[in-house]
Image: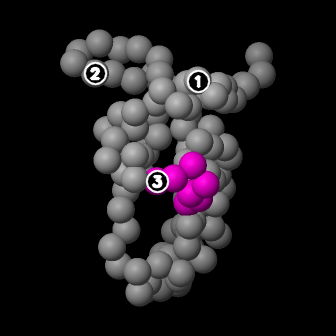
């Protein structure tokens, strides 16, 4: 069985409220791209099994966080892309061996 990636329809994208990241979701315009993985706001949305108030269901999720230390941002982005591969509408693929090698080289 092939593992296909579900993409949000225009309606699903427009109706999505940001879930646990509502404030950040609403603050980002439709042309925004993640400075690290270069995915758009829409491409960060992924279809996954979720839970809320004790019930489990399938739904869209998009995780965001605010980054405050902008002095180190470029170096961080250039490092993270060496061991994290992103795919639209999917989880990141993390190469933990590469990440460990980078970490060890910084010690």
Please name the colour scheme applied to the rendered image.
Answer: one colour
Q: Would residue 28 be found to the left or right of residue 101 on screen?
A: left
Q: Main secondary structure of the magenta part?
A: loop
Q: Are marks 2 and 1 in contact (CB under 8 Å)?
A: no
The CA distance from mark 2 to mark 1 is 22 Å
Q: Position of residue 45 (x, y in %)?
A: 54, 38
Camera-near label (2 vs 3) is 3
Which residue carries the number 1 mark?
A: 11
Q: Which mark is residue 28?
A: 3
Q: In which quadrant of the rendered view does residue 80 lie?
A: bottom right
Q: Residue at x 40, y 38 (%)?
A: 18
Which structural element holds mark 2?
Answer: strand
Camera-side residue: 93 or 51? 51
Camera-near label (2 vs 1) is 1
The CA distance from mark 2 to mark 3 is 24 Å
Total count of labels:
3
Question: What is the magenta range?
Answer: 28-34
| Label 3 crowd bin: few (<14), some (14–19), many (20+), radius 10 Å | few
Lower position in the chain sequence, tag 1 or tag 3: 1
Q: Can I make out residue 52 in this image?
A: yes
Does the magenta segment cover residue 30?
yes
Q: Quadrant of the C terminus?
A: bottom left
**Height in image: 73 above or below 17?**
below
Q: Which mark is residue 49?
A: none
Camera-side residue: 63 or 106? 63
Does the magenta segment cover residue 21?
no
Q: Residue at x 37, y 56 (%)?
A: 65
Q: Which mark is residue 52?
A: 2
The CA distance from mark 1 to mark 3 is 18 Å
| Label 1 crowd bin: few (<14), some (14–19), many (20+), radius 10 Å | few
Q: Quadrant of the N terminus?
A: top right
Q: Position of residue 88 (x, y in %)?
A: 66, 43
């Amino acid at each position: 069985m092939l593992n296909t990636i579900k993409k949000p329809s225009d309606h699903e994208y427009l109706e999505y409220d940001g879930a646990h990241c509502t404030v950040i979701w609403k603050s980002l315009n439709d042309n925004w791209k993640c400075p690290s993985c270069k995915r758009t706001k829409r491409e960060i949305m992924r279809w996954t099994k979720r839970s809320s108030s004790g019930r489990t269901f399938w739904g869209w999720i998009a995780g965001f966080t605010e980054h405050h230390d902008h002095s180190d941002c470029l170096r961080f982005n250039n490092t993270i892309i060496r061991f994290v591969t992103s795919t639209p509408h999917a989880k990141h693929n993390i190469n933990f061996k590469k990440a460990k090698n980078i970490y060890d080289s910084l010690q």
